[in-house]
Image: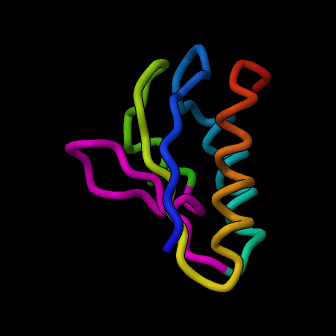
Amino acid sequence: MRSENVTVRFEHGLHMRVAAQIAKIAQRFNAAVHIRKEGRPQANAGSILEIMSLGATAGEHLSVSADGPEKDEAVRAVTGLFDQGGGI
């Protein structure tokens, strides 16, 4: 398993458009990708609804983890989206 912490840099948090981008990226890989927010159940990063259910707002810290053959690439791709932040 690989895990990395990220900060939500999207002005309006994890809204529908951002969640859709994350899900699209996560589904490309042969790995189970999850996002965690403290105090909430983990969300399947391939599911827009589960991502949005985290209720993550700008500035909050999350953990992105993956397990499977392409775990490193999956975590790198999803965290890369968080790094670009306000571009979405």
Q: Residue at x 71, y 18 (%)?
A: 86
Q: Is residue 82 left or right of residue 34?
A: right
Determine the residue positioned at 74% across, 66% down: 73
Q: Nearer the viewer, residue 42 or 72?
A: 72
Residue positioned most to the top: 11
Q: Position of residue 22 (x, y in %)?
A: 66, 49
Taking the image as shown, residue 63 lies to the left or right of residue 23, namely left
Q: Is residue 36 magenta?
A: yes
> What is the tally of numbered marks visible in this picture?
0
Q: Residue at x 42, y 57 (%)?
A: 43
* Residue 22 vertical placement versus 72 (above, below): above
Vertical position of residue 80 compared to residue 76: above or below: above
On-image quarter of the C terminus: top right
Percent coordinates x, y for residue 29 in the rendering: 73, 73
Which residue shows up at 49% across the image and 48% down it?
51
In the picture, residue 68 is in which quadrant? Answer: bottom right
Q: Position of residue 26 (x, y in %)?
A: 67, 62
Snapshot quadrant of residue 27: bottom right
Residue furthest out toward the bottom:
69
Specify start and end residues of the magenta stretch as a single range.
31-47
